[in-house]
């Protein structure tokens, strides 16, 4: 089973991780990256949860050789001694991080969701048009996961550098208005990007990718946490598209 590892903090570094079943039921994990700096070593781990949520380290791979971009590791138990075999990979709630170095674990050079968090290829894009601030607009894309939940990615153009922009799904259509139903991770003003795991609404009601496509709602992106009344981008979703 192969999972993509997309580039993150360092442009040009990306690749994949492949899990191959051994006769004894264990797994060989092979990471192959392109664009790694020569002479370095890149720690890599399986973390709990989705990449959008973040989580603790479950398993440490053999560090990636910067000269070859490759790492090979036997996988039979997690770091805490819990058994984890090839048959468990499809069901894991996890993701893979590759770090710049052991001295700079905070810099993620490649990342990808694995197991039940892998993306199926199904997605839906909604337009977010400018509102109170001219030139700020974008899109919201929902990607379906293997487990039926969704990854929501907001991509907003012309956001002011240094800021954070709260964003929510509201009930009803934008013309009618309604209460907040779901809170996204705030949009980063420097990148214009927000990535959020969507599996339940703020009231803990479960919502799936398929249900989002028929949901009676709309999205608001706000100027800042202290200026929620200023809507910088907005768009209907689901049944209101």
Image (cartoon, grey):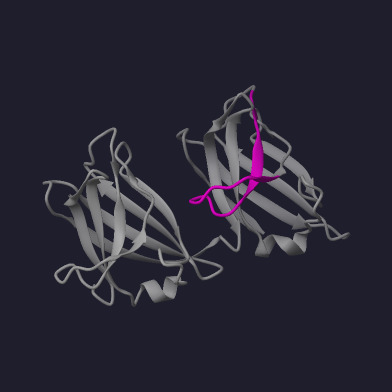
Which x, y percent locates residue 31? 66, 44
In the rendered image, which quarter is residue 207 located in? bottom left
Q: Nearer the viewer, residue 144 or 20?
A: 144
Which quadrant is the N terminus positioned in? Answer: bottom right
Give the magenta range.
40-58
Q: Nearer the viewer, residue 172 or 77?
A: 172
* Above or below 159: residue 210: below
Which x, y percent locates residue 13? 52, 37
Which x, y percent locates residue 14? 53, 41
Furthest-right residue in this view: 24
Q: Nearer the viewer, residue 166 or 44?
A: 166
Which quadrant is the C terminus positioned in? Answer: bottom left
Number of marks drawn: 0
Q: In the image, is residue 42 part of the stretch drawn in magenta? A: yes
Whether residue 218 sits left or right of residue 52 in the image: it is left
* Above or below 106: residue 110: below
Q: In the image, is residue 48 part of the stretch drawn in magenta? A: yes
Whether residue 198 sits left or right of residue 217 in the image: it is right
In the rendered image, which quarter is residue 21 located in? bottom right
Q: Residue at x 65, y 39 (%)?
A: 44
Whether residue 194 sits left or right of residue 110 in the image: it is left
Q: Residue at x 58, y 34 (%)?
A: 99
Whether residue 97 sits left or right of residue 153 in the image: it is right
Q: Residue at x 44, y 70 (%)?
A: 209
In the rendered image, which quarter is residue 172 located in? bottom left
* Above or below 57: residue 148: below
Which x, y percent locates residue 64? 67, 34
């Amino acid at each position: 089973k192969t999972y993509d590892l997309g580039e993150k903090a360092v442009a040009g570094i990306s690749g994949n991780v492949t899990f191959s079943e051994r006769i004894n039921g264990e797994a060989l994990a092979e990471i192959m990256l392109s664009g790694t700096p020569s002479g370095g070593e890149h720690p890599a781990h399986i973390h709990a949860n989705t990449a959008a949520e973040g989580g603790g380290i479950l398993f440490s791979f053999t560090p990636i050789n910067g000269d070859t971009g490759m790492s090979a590791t036997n996988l039979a138990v997690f770091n805490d001694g819990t058994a984890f075999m090839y048959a468990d990979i499809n069901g894991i709630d996890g993701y893979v991080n590759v770090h710049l170095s052991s001295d700079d674990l905070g810099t993620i050079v490649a990342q990808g969701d694995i197991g039940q968090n892998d993306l199926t290829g199904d997605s839906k894009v909604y337009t977010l048009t400018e509102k109170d601030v001219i030139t700020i607009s974008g899109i919201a894309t929902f990607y379906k996961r293997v487990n039926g939940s969704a990854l929501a990615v907001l991509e907003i153009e012309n956001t002011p550098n240094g800021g954070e922009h709260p964003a929510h799904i509201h009930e009803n259509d934008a013309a009618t208005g309604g209460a907040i139903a779901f809170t996204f991770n705030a949009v980063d003003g420097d990148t214009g990007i927000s990535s959020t795991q969507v599996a339940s609404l703020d009231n803990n009601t479960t919502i799936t990718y398929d249900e989002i496509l028929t949901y009676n709602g709309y999205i608001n992106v706000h100027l800042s946490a202290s200026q929620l009344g200023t809507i910088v981008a907005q768009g209907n979703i689901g049944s209101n598209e």
